[in-house]
Amino acid sequence: MVFKYIQNLKFQKGITLIELIVVIFMIAVFSGIMIADFPKIQRQSALLRATYSMAQDFRKAEDMGTSGVQTLGADNCPVPVKGYGVYVDTTQPTTYLIYADIAGVDGTSDKRYNSGVLCSQSSYYQASSNCGIRITIPVPKDCVVETISVNAENASLSLEKIIDVNADGSDGSHSYDDVSVNFNPPNPTTTITASGDTALSAVKVFLKNTDGSSRKVLINKSGLIDVQ
């Protein structure tokens, strides 16, 4: 039986030198293609991750608006938050904000972003052990919970544009410099306000690469947040 096994080995065909050269050549060609396209692959991957990260930040603000989480100011007292939101400004193409929507003197809010300072630097109460003496603020300024960098992972990324959305979900024809997406508890209620106090039912925020490729995040008044 051992003799028969040795005989079979003698007739098994091995790899020829030409076949080996062809395999090595093909590996070299595919490796060259991968190396040449690697920067593009990196940019595309970074764009995809940044777009999904932005969608997650919108969901984070929505969750904060639902939970009614407290935000503390510089005086270590809770600021009078009515909701939370995300503010995107294409004139500042590398960052966007998660903000706390601050109540006015009458306890209501305009449900949009009004520029202010970091929440940790805000002061809405007089010095008091129980935080119960509120300073009169005729025009309240919202405070910034977090500033997110679009191009932290890859310098080729930036905010491209903000557009409205048609009833069928297709891209609209109107473009805006900035948009505020506000989430007020308890449901939460979603309010979308573009530049010029334009109320929208849905909006798309575009991120782009320097190579011209782009991805977008859709947000509508029903609370839908989707990457496209």
Image (spheres, rainbow, N blue to C red):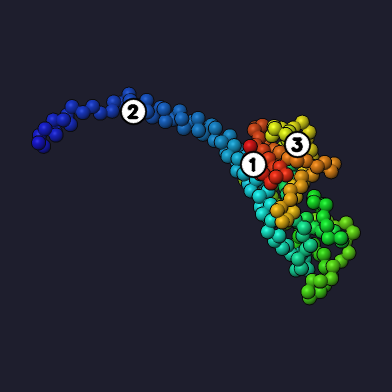
Kindly report which numbered mark, 3 or 2, lies closer to the viewer in this rendering.
3
Q: Is residue 87 visible?
A: no
Mark 1 sits on what residue? 226
Q: Distance of mark 1 from mark 3, alpha carbons?
A: 15 Å
Of the two numbered discs 2 and 1 on the same chain, state the one appearing first in sequence. Answer: 2
Residue at 73% across, 33% down: 166
For residue 147, side relative to residue 25 (left or right): right
Q: Quadrant of residue 24?
A: top left
Outermost residue toward the bottom in this view: 129
Q: Which circle, 2 or 1, is nearer the viewer?
A: 1
Q: Amino acid at mark 1?
A: Asp
- The answer to whether the residues at label 2 and label 1 have Cβ atoms under 8 Å apart is no
| C-alpha distance separating marks 2 and 1 | 49 Å
Q: Residue at x 71, y 60 (%)?
A: 68
The residue singled out by tag 2 in the image is 20
Residue where numbered disc 3 is placed: 164
